[in-house]
Amino acid sequence: MKERTRARSLALQVLYETDMSDHPPGIVFRQRLKEVSLSENEKRRKSLEDFAHKIVFGVLPLTEKLDIAIADYAPDWPLDQIAPIDLNILRIAFWEFGISKSTPTKVAINEAVELAKLYGSDGAPSFINGVLGSLATQKNEIFQSFKGI
């Protein structure tokens, strides 16, 4: 697994556990860091930790708004019918390319599909790809609704 994919995986695990429990995200993040080797290189490891941290604490305060955007572009799948792991993969990817604009759209979608292959059901990669493809076509309009947050 590529280093940045490992960092996204760490962020996904934190977001998933936070969703499924009352565990504080900061504590979960630190605990997961102890369990995952992001890189042997100290400088690179710190950069990857920062990247994962930005994802987790970028997504968490926007979860409700991200979910509204996702629901609008996955109308055949009500949010309560989307597996929590898939929902968090969608949140991460859309946050990366649509909100923080820190990752090129195609890269974020490809990384999300890879995470779906690792953690989701058999149909998750195509579902993730389809929803993110729809979100990508409207990302600028959706971004406008996030301004001022």
Image: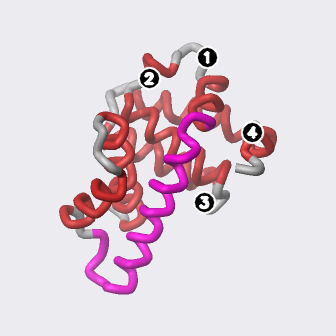
Query: Residues under labels 1 and 3: Cα distance?
Result: 26 Å
Q: Which residue is mark 2?
A: 82
Which residues lie in the magenta part?
38-65
For the residues carrying marks 3 and 2, which lies nearer the camera in this image?
A: 2
First in sequence, mark 3 or 4: give its number. Answer: 3
Q: Position of residue 9 (x, y in %)?
A: 35, 53
Check residue 35 in the rendering and tell me which mark sits there, or answer none: none
Residue neighbourhood size for the residue with mark 2, other residues' Cα within 10 Å, grouped as few (<14), some (14–19), many (≥20)? some
Check residue 75 in the rendering and tell me which mark sits there, or answer none: 1
Q: Which residue is mark 3?
A: 103
Name which quarter of the figure residue 143 lies in. top right
Instruction: Specify whether residue 62 is in view.
Output: yes
Q: Which residue is mark 4?
A: 142
Mark 1 element type: loop
Q: Position of residue 132 (x, y in %)?
A: 59, 37
Mark 4 element type: helix
**What's the amino acid at mark 4?**
Ile
**What's the amino acid at mark 2?**
Ile
